[in-house]
Amino acid sequence: METHITKRALAAHLAGERRQGRTVGFVPTMGALHEGHVSLMRRARAENDVVVASIFVNPLQFGPTEDFTRYPRDLEGDAHRAAEAGVDLLFSPGVEEMYPAGTIATRVELGPIGETGEGRWRPGFFSGVATVCLKLFHVVPADRVYFGQKDAQQLAVIRRIVADLDIPVDVVGCPTVREPDGLALSSRNAYLDPQARRTASAFPRALFAARDAVAAGEGSAAGVRWVVEAHLEREPALRLQYVDVFDPVSFAPRERIEGRAILAGAAFVGGTRLIDNVEVASQIGSHVPEQKEMAAG
Amino acid sequence: METHITKRALAAHLAGERRQGRTVGFVPTMGALHEGHVSLMRRARAENDVVVASIFVNPLQFGPTEDFTRYPRDLEGDAHRAAEAGVDLLFSPGVEEMYPAGTIATRVELGPIGETGEGRWRPGFFSGVATVCLKLFHVVPADRVYFGQKDAQQLAVIRRIVADLDIPVDVVGCPTVREPDGLALSSRNAYLDPQARRTASAFPRALFAARDAVAAGEGSAAGVRWVVEAHLEREPALRLQYVDVFDPVSFAPRERIEGRAILAGAAFVGGTRLIDNVEVASQIGSHVPEQKEMAAG
């Protein structure tokens, strides 16, 4: 595996690969790699001639009170994991390489899809994500990019900008990887002490219970929220921030569940904010098989 | 010359050209081609293996009271002019090809560079321009794109998004082409009747007079505005909307002229809005040769 820290060196390398007609798969990450990221890299490895991964903690997508400075960073461990997962080229630029003037005024604005769900609690977050991803897609011209369903709204946002801006890349969404007790893998799980870690698993269990309720006939978002809240009553150390039902494409909130939808939310355990989501499928509307999930390897 | 009306057909053709290592030059236009556009196409012809031009009147960059529906359209004449100028591929999509859902919520937002000058009078204009150009750059992966200095702020905006978003293309700015009496070529000149046409030429003459004043030592934007306004007093049929001095890169307004700057403005002759600009160069600050201009062929 080769590591590049400049756009220029990476672009030169990739131009050579593409001239030879080789396909490129790209996995953008913020590092602190776990089995969720590794599953994306393995999928990219299986589907492309060349696999590129990026590690960049993007200041544009953090709010002023968020965890940009303390976000976990482990470049050496990450390089090891990426190489093992079959990555050919690792791109790990510094902030000054991506934002030579410190920041940029240019932003991808998204409209409603950036303002619902996570966007309500993290103003500017999806605009920051979309902007850096667009930059990375220009630096790493790829045939396919890989994102996890764990960040379901982010995946929907990426699909939206790819469609709206005619970005020549296929977006591949990959199943959430979970611990045996259900907790979705996340770099931020590293913030949890053992007790908080145990508490955290109540969040996915509550979402699974709500998913079962929908499969059993619950058709309203209010009913689904009630199931989640009732489930979490037993866990006072976990504070639910929101849980709502969303359209899987537009991420518009839905009051009625018809066909496929995403049940997504955020919860605090101590000072750590966790997000998670499950696909729910109602009998009403067209039947679509539920989204697959993977056990952590 | 081949004409394509779908992104897919154009992309397939261009992918073949690029696999053979051929360089691509791209001239995006709104059609109603004149010698200004032709000069961009000839320049692209001289510098690239393949020349692509697009003709698309972009609804996103017109305000609700502006001239989208009556903007001049002449696809047959344009195709003839483009072929004569050496264009290999003409892309002339319909609105439904570029905006399958009618419009898009996604926008490139620019910050201050989109809000000064023209942006003050045309809210959303530069965001609409930047958004459609970004789409076109994705549809037409080119080595070089060509824009006229006639639209100086647009050129600055394109340079800004290319830098901020790491778009892999070189931006080539080309000199304004003028009629013998000084009027900058513009598709909107077609709106002018013979008398309005004569009146219109007072606008560039006033800008030239101000440029001479700067070369002779006038160093303030207020002084420059006074020269332009004094010059236009003799032309009551021409109504100046604004004229200001701008930084050539950031398009921030400047009150003092030091080194190179852009004197740009807009004026109405009857219902027709004309824009124009000249580069001014003060003795104060570093000396840079003034921008070249071309006579219409």
Image (spheres, coloured by chain):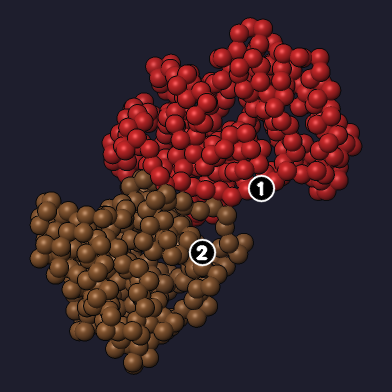
Chain colours: A red, B brown
B228 left or right of A61 in image:
left
Give how far across and how far down residue B159 sits, in percent: 32, 54
Disc 1 element: loop
- Left/right placement of residue B198 relative to residue A72 reads left
Label 2 is found on which chain of the structure?
B
Q: Amino acid at mark 1?
A: Ser
- Quadrant (top left/top right/bottom left/bottom right) for the C terminus of chain B: bottom left
In depth, the one of B3 and A137 nearer the eye is A137
Residue A6 vs residue A150: left or right?
Answer: left
Q: Residue at x 22, y 66 (%)?
A: B224
Disc 1 versus disc 2: distance between alpha carbons? 21 Å
Under mark 2, the amino acid is Leu
* Chain of the residue where label 1 is placed in the rendered structure: A
Q: Residue furthest top?
A: A194
The reply to whether label 1 and label 2 mark residues of one chain is no
**Residue in view at x 31 percent, y 67 percent:** B243
Looking at the picture, tell me which residue is in the foreground, A223 or B208.
B208
Is A24 situated above or below B242?
above
Mark 2 — residue? B60
